[in-house]
Image: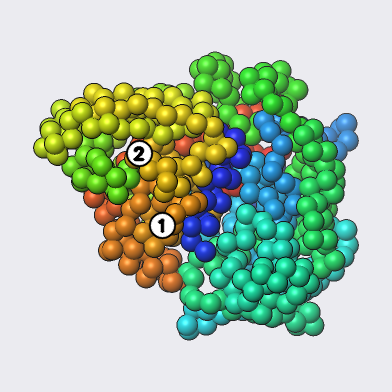
């Protein structure tokens, strides 16, 4: 997730995917057992994805924590409250937690609307750990895996002082379902949720959600076991809002929430403002160190980079454009870093259509791709990979050796040509699909050229990004191969495997663009997705990843890298934590 090639582009992929499946180091609150947050500069990206700049951060934290602990709390600047201005390239899709699905919005909203569960504010795999949010503890799950029971913390208040009630949770889910949110498919597994949608009555009861405002107890019953449901409860969509919040898009007047920040002003296509919520105090969640964060829309990414250099902006969400990167790396490296996201970029290979119905042709593609060349097309902001699972995702185990050769070495195009000849596919006509965002378009043209080099007759077909995924996901298109990528909705391998699940194939809005339909992989996804204890089955998920790659069902080539770039007045070294799901963590930001 994240605005690398525009938010609408990611939204289309995510929605398609889900429909197919029906020191100033932040000091924790006084009642928190959380250790001080330690911000560390990431290692060179190599082959790691690690928006979650991996578990190595834990050992660094132990070594550096004493020094950071001496920094103390945030001190007000002499000129008044600490304020910064950040730049976004486009208006977020929504600033209402029930509706927003854009990465640049999620980066802000997770600090405003805390759900019952949330994630630890940490880098690396530590940041994928679920922790209690507004709930007292992690859920109690019934033996059959279908009933989740939680209890709301006592004494909670929204940013406007309204008391938080257990029934507000059901209201939050009602808003998601009634407003036809892109988050709807995540919650249709709740008993009665589909009936609620069909009735179309906003205040109708959702049978599978029971709440008790006196005790704070919340019970959720699912139609079938879902081992990812705790992650679903931690999504921004499930962030609590007051029970009288209207059933309408509140982007212009965002509702109150419970979090270290509150949204106090919103002028779509111009700016929105986050202000520190001084009454916020929850264990495990830092309060934030900047008093006021103004997010302004700067549509020209080149100008945004220049504004950070000059100090007109303090941070930008999007990376500098490729021809600016070299200068930024060289001249401003003391306030710039690159990190790898939990994402995978790959070429889909439609196994139902010639010539990719032949395993030898799919293998040839994997041998032929020069992943180093593709990384250069992204300005270096792509970490070559062999796996479909990205580093940082629970269940990732690096494939070593890679069956198709070292992803950081030259490809074996001679072997690829041999396989094309063995398959009798020389001269086969292939249309290579891609969208018109800059990097995907360049990658599509490169890919078509590679296919021609190994003996196929390939031509690129580039269409608008706003309709790309719907087009290649329609069986009438008969898309043979092309550009695809996936950014996590939450850090769970089942979230990734949905785009290669044969049981999710459908005529339209199909996110399994290659029509991967391997009975063993399908059975594995179904079985492992029901297991609520992810740690117990991580190795089995890793085996599914290996099988997917070794059978050449697709051709993964990289994990997208993003950046943190700050102005001189920001304390970059100590206050620039990168979270594996929400990217740059604004609660870690501070001024020098």
What residue is drawn where x is 35% and y is 38%? 481
Q: CA distance from mark 2 to mark 1?
A: 16 Å
Q: Quadrant of the C terminus?
A: top right
Foreground of the two, 579 or 410: 410
**Where residue 517 sits: x, y (%)?**
32, 57
Label 1 element class: loop
Q: Are marks 2 and 1 in contact (CB under 8 Å)?
A: no
Quarter of the image holding residue 141? Answer: bottom right
Quarter of the image holding residue 353? Answer: top left
Q: Is residue 310 visible?
A: yes
Q: Quadrant of the N terminus?
A: top right
Quarter of the image holding residue 302? Answer: top right
Residue 267 appears left or right of 195: right
**Where residue 369 sits: x, y (%)?**
29, 31
In this rendering, is residue 325 above or below 558?
above
Which mark, by number, is residue 481? 2
Foreground of the two, 351 or 373: 351
Label 2 element class: strand
Q: Is residue 404 visible?
A: no
Chain-order first, disc 2 or disc 1? 2
Residue 504 appears left or right of 131: left
Which mark, by number, is residue 505? 1
Q: Residues within 10 Å of mark 2 (few under 14, many from 20)?
A: many
What residue is drawn where x is 38% and y is 58%? 501
**Where residue 342 sits: x, y (%)?**
47, 46
In this rendering, is residue 295 above or below 473?
above
What residue is drawn where x is 62% and y is 54%? 182
**Where residue 399 sits: x, y (%)?**
28, 47
């Amino acid at each position: 997730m994240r605005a690398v090639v525009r938010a609408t582009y990611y939204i289309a992929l995510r929605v398609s995917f889900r429909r197919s499946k029906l020191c100033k180091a932040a000091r924790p609150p006084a009642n928190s057992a959380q250790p001080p947050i330690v911000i560390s500069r990431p290692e060179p990206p190599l082959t790691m994805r690690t928006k979650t700049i991996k578990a190595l951060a834990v050992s660094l934290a132990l070594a550096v924590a004493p020094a950071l602990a001496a920094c103390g709390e945030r001190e007000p600047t002499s000129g008044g409250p600490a304020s910064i201005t950040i730049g976004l390239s486009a208006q977020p899709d929504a600033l209402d937690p029930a509706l927003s699905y854009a990465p640049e919005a999620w980066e802000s909203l997770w600090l405003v609307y805390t759900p019952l569960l949330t994630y630890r504010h940490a880098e690396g795999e530590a940041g994928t750990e679920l922790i209690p949010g507004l709930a007292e503890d992690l859920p109690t799950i019934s033996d059959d895996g279908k009933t989740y029971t939680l209890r709301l913390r006592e004494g909670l208040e929204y940013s406007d002082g309204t008391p938080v009630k257990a029934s507000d949770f059901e209201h939050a889910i009602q808003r998601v379902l009634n407003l036809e949110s892109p988050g709807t498919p995540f919650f249709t597994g709740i008993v009665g949720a589909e009936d609620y949608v069909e009735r179309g009555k906003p205040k109708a009861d959702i049978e599978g959600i029971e709440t008790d405002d006196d005790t704070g107890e919340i019970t959720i019953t699912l139609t079938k076991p879902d081992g990812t449901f705790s992650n679903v409860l931690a999504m921004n969509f499930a962030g609590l809002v007051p029970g009288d919040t209207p059933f309408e898009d509140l982007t212009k007047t965002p509702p109150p929430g419970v979090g270290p920040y509150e949204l106090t002003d919103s002028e779509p296509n111009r700016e929105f403002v986050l202000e520190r919520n001084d009454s916020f105090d929850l264990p495990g969640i830092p309060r934030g160190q900047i008093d006021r964060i103004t997010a302004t829309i700067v549509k020209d990414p080149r100008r945004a980079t220049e504004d950070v250099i000059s100090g007109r902006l303090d941070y930008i969400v999007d990376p500098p454009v490729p021809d600016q990167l070299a200068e930024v790396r060289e001249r401003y490296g003391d306030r710039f870093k690159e990190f790898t996201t939990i994402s995978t970029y790959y070429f889909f290979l439609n196994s139902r259509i010639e010539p990719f119905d032949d395993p030898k042709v799919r293998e040839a593609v994997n041998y032929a791709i020069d992943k180093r060349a593709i990384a250069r097309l992204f300005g270096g902001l792509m970490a070559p990979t062999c796996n479909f699972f990205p580093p940082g995702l629970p269940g990732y185990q690096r494939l070593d050796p890679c069956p198709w050769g070292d992803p950081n070495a030259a490809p074996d195009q001679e072997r690829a040509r041999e396989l094309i000849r063995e398959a009798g596919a020389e001269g086969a006509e292939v249309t290579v699909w891609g969208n018109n965002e800059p990097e995907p378009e360049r990658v599509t043209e490169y890919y078509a050229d590679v296919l021609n080099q190994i003996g196929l007759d390939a031509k690129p077909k580039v269409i608008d990004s706003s309709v790309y995924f719907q087009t290649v996901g329609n069986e009438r298109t008969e898309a043979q191969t092309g550009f695809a990528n996936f950014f996590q909705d939450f850090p769970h391998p089942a979230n990734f495997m949905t785009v290669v699940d044969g049981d999710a194939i459908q005529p339209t809005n199909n996110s399994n663009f290659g029509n991967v339909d391997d009975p063993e992989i399908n059975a594995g996804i179904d079985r492992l997705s029901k297991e609520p204890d992810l740690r117990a089955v991580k190795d089995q998920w890793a085996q599914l990843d290996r099988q997917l790659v070794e059978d050449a069902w697709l051709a993964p080539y990289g994990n997208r890298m993003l950046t943190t770039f700050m102005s001189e007045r920001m304390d970059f070294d100590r206050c620039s934590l990168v979270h594996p799901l929400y990217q740059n963590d604004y609660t870690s930001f501070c001024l020098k």
